[in-house]
Amino acid sequence: MMTNHDQLAVDINQDITEVADILVALGDKKRLMLLSHLINAYQSAPLCVRDLTELTDLSRPAVSHHLKILREAGIISFKKEGTQSYYFLDNVPANVAKIKQLTDDLVKITC
């Protein structure tokens, strides 16, 4: 029979699996800087690579690389308009809920 502690350990392993890509994507200062710019633009308009290049000291290829990682982690999405791709925050409530579940389970198992 599985104890509460054992079940929490299983839950934490599942939580970690679900948020690993998000945490890796957020674990880079340059990606956090790009995310910050996307957050600041959230109420106005999505940003394209050119916009983000102008707002940072990063090259276009570097911006594109970091945006790809954020996109693959499900943190941002993009929409194409002609030849431009415009990036914006996505899945915020779901991503926050996943991270919160992990931290809640960690508190339960360690307290």
Image (cartoon, rainbow, N blue to C red):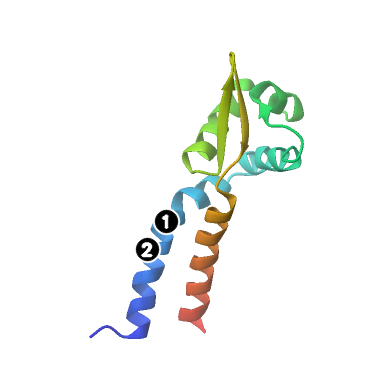
* Quarter of the image that includes the N terminus: bottom left
User: Which kind of residue does numbered mark 2 sit on?
Assistant: Gln
Give the tally of numbered discs. Answer: 2
Q: Which residue in the protein does label 1 denote?
A: 18
Residue farthest top in this picture: 83
Nearest the viewer among 80 and 63 is 80
Q: Is residue 94 left or right of residue 30?
A: left
Which residue is rendered at x = 49% and y = 66% of the image?
102
SS of the residue at dot 2?
A: helix
The picture places residue 27, in percent across and down from the top left corner, at 56, 49
Which residue is rendered at x = 42% and y = 60% of the image?
16
Against 22, is 71 above or below? above
Are circles 1 and 2 on residues that touch, CB within 8 Å? yes
Against 5, is 100 above or below? above
Q: Is residue 17 left or right of residue 100?
A: left
SS of the residue at dot 1?
A: helix
Q: CA distance from mark 1 to mark 2?
A: 6 Å
Q: Which residue in the protein does label 2 denote?
A: 14
Which residue is rendered at x = 50% and y = 43% of the image?
74
The picture places residue 111, in percent across and down from the top left corner, at 52, 84
- At label 1, counting other C-alpha atoms closer than 10 Å, the crowd grade (few under 14, some 14-19, many 20 or more) is some
- At label 2, counting other C-alpha atoms closer than 10 Å, the crowd grade (few under 14, some 14-19, many 20 or more) is few
Q: Is residue 104 left or right of residue 29?
A: left
